[in-house]
Each structure stands twice: as C-alpha cells, then as structure tokens.
Image: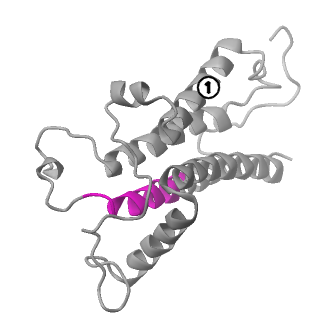
Amino acid sequence: LPKLSPRKPPSSVLSAETLLSMTVQFLIHFLAIMAAAFLSDAYVDPYDPSIVPDGPFHPNTLNTATFLVTVLATINTFLVNYRGRPFMEDLRENKLLYKSIQGCYLVLFACASEVFTPLNQLMQLSPLPSSGPPAYHIRNEGGGSVGHNDAFGAVQDLLLQAVSLVGFRTLLCVIMCLDTALVTVAEKAIRLLLEG
C-alpha cells in the first residue's frame, strides 16, 4: 500500500483476538471434519482389506469425504485470516490469491457433487454414495449403530436420516458450506468484538 494505516496491527501473535479466533476456527473445522467422518463411516465396509493402516491406498467414502472437508478447512483458513485493508491490499485487489481461492472452491464443490467424474478419478477420489447406508451398516436392537457409543451413534443416525432426505453428496456440500459460513461469521464477530 502506498500509505500507512493510522491503526496499529496487534502487538503480539498471542493476543486475545488471535487466540480466540484460532480456537473458534479449530472447533468449527473439527466439527465439520467429524460430521463428514460420522457420515461416511456407515459407507465403509469393515471387512475391506484397503482400510489396513499401513496398507496400500485405496479410495473409499471415508477418506474422500474427510479429504474434501480438510482441504476446504485449509482454504477457509486462508480466506478468513486474510486481513486486507488497512494493513495490506484487499482480497479482491490481490487478483492471484482471489482467483486461486475461487478456483479451489470450484474444484472442491465439483468433486463433492461429482459433476465431472474424470476430475474425481484424477484426484483418486472414491465415487460418493447416492442412496442410504449399505447393508453392512448393521443396526442393534436399540436402534443405534453397532460399534458406537450412544452419543456417536445418535449423531451418525441423525446424519444418515439427513442423507435419506437430501442425499449424501448434497449433505456433504451442506457441511462444507456450513464450515465456510460459520468460520467467516465467527471471524468477523471476533474482529468486531475485540478490535473496536
């Protein structure tokens, strides 16, 4: 910028604003990743040999969904933490970064909605389900998922009910949109609350 701002930037990286912002962003991203994991877990065959921790990589619904949400969380971190004016140029003026972020969002949502399957194949992503959970998603007598305690089973059951209403791909896109919206609103609220 040709002119310095009269307002000073935060004096420390460990300011209250920064620490609160990092904590809130972490919690939102963590919840989004966990929602994608709970959602996808029902579609992973427990007897699939490719889920061995040190075995060769084979794409499945779980690693595809968590990859997409994790990459989205990284892009969202760049977006919401970019300060812009008055300390540096506005994001829309930084055309390369602005176009790069737009391109990343476009690619991620194209992969999540599977509108261009060769892109998913190039990125070694598993085809995402189009219907409810498979037959190997066994249910116990109490109605919850086998292998999960009550809280995790309840969250997974709620997500699977949402899948039956809108579909897996749509729900994954909703989780991704919620992550983006929540971190953006939270960061703006923290800045207004603690900068002023």
In percent of the image, x 37 and y 65: which residue is there? 133
Q: How is the image coloured?
A: one colour
In percent of the image, x 31 and y 31: which residue is there? 124
In percent of the image, x 51 and y 66: which residue is there? 164
Q: Is residue 39 magenta?
A: yes
Q: Quadrant of residue 64?
A: top left
Name which residue type carries label 1. Answer: Ile
Percent across and percent down for residue 33 are 46, 53
**Magenta: predominant secondary structure element?**
helix
Q: Is residue 143 magenta?
A: no
Drawn side of residue 53 relative to residue 6, left or right: left
Tell me the quadrant of the picture where the N terminus can be found: top right
Q: Nearer the viewer, residue 54 or 90?
A: 54
Q: Which residue is mark 1?
A: 101
Q: Nearer the viewer, residue 25 or 119?
A: 119
- SS for dot 1: helix
Percent across and percent down for residue 190 are 74, 51
Q: Residues within 10 Å of mark 1 (few under 14, many from 20)?
A: some
Percent across and percent down for residue 80 are 67, 38
The span shown in magenta is 29-44
> Is residue 19 visible in the rendered structure shown here?
no
Percent across and percent down for residue 35 are 47, 60
Q: Quadrant of residue 28?
A: bottom right
In percent of the image, x 50 and y 73: which residue is there? 158
> Is residue 68 visible in the rendered structure shown here?
yes
Furthest residue to the bottom? 142
In the displayed structure, 138 sits above or below 185; it is: below
Drawn side of residue 130 relative to residue 63, left or right: right
